[in-house]
Image (spheres, rainbow, N blue to C red):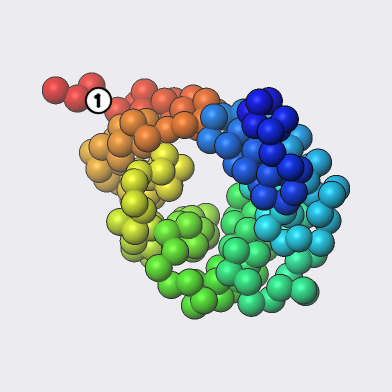
Amino acid sequence: MEDFSKRYPKNKNYYIFLANFAEILDFCERGVEYAEEGAKAYPEELDMVLTLASGYACLENYEKVLSLVEPLLKKYPKDAFVLNFVGYSYVELGKNLEEAEKLLLRALQINPLDPYILDSVGWCYYKKGDLDLAIQYLEKAVNRLPEDEAVIVEHLADAYLKKGNKEKACELYQKALKAVIHKRDKERIEKKFENCPIPK
């Protein structure tokens, strides 16, 4: 990444690329540093602000994510990514779940096949205790992914576990562990998988 930074001009896409690449490599703190630098240079660029929000989501700092994306709702009331970011942040923080549901369903109307929005809606219903609806949306999210994403598969596993289907949940936790990138996700999912019977 250092070599890349010397060879390419520091435009908006430069910062977004480095921040996203750092996140993929599980260097979330470094990703936030790149995104912070980019957001200072391009404070009015929506994709730059969303990249910074994504970095803080990688660190699971959803208070910070919310402080970045909530003000964007007035300017971008019909942007599915903004609606999803705000709604999902509410869900992760366990607050404003009714408002989160409205925002996420609005995002889903705009992008009905987006697996990340489907996941957010499902996770919202999980937090609200509606497990049947949660599983319905989370199944759709997992099926829409081009390849498994650990957290989304984990969400579906959590819903099945709470519903009482431990066998299905354990199968999904194992699947999530095979797809996991981030260390903190791996540690969290491994703890859940510890309660599963050893596969034969």
Position of the C terminus, as image quadrant, is top left
* Drawn side of residue 177 relative to residue 48, left or right: left
Q: Is residue 73 above or below residue 61?
A: below
**Camera-side residue of 42 and 126:** 42
Residue 142 position, x and y percent, is 34, 53
Q: How many labels does the image show?
A: 1
Identify which residue is drawn at 53% across, 35% down.
24
Residue count near mark 1 (Cα–Cα under 10 Å), binned few <14, some 14–19, many ≥20: few
- The image quarter containing residue 84 is bottom right
- The image quarter containing residue 158 is top left
Q: Name the residue under label 1.
A: 197
**Camera-side residue of 36 and 144:** 36
Q: What residue type is labelled 1?
A: Pro
Identify which residue is drawn at 80% across, 49% down.
39
Position of the N terminus, as image quadrant, is top right
Q: Is residue 123 above or below residue 9?
A: below
* Drawn side of residue 75 relative to residue 149, left or right: right
Asked if residue 197 can be seen in this view, the reply is yes
Residue 165 position, x and y percent, is 27, 45
Looking at the image, the residue that sits furthest to the front is 7
Dot 1 falls on a residue whose secondary structure is loop
Q: In this view, does 47 lie above or below 93?
A: below
**Camera-side residue of 89 and 194:** 89
Q: In this view, does 18 lie above or below 87?
A: above
Identify which residue is drawn at 54% across, 29% down.
25
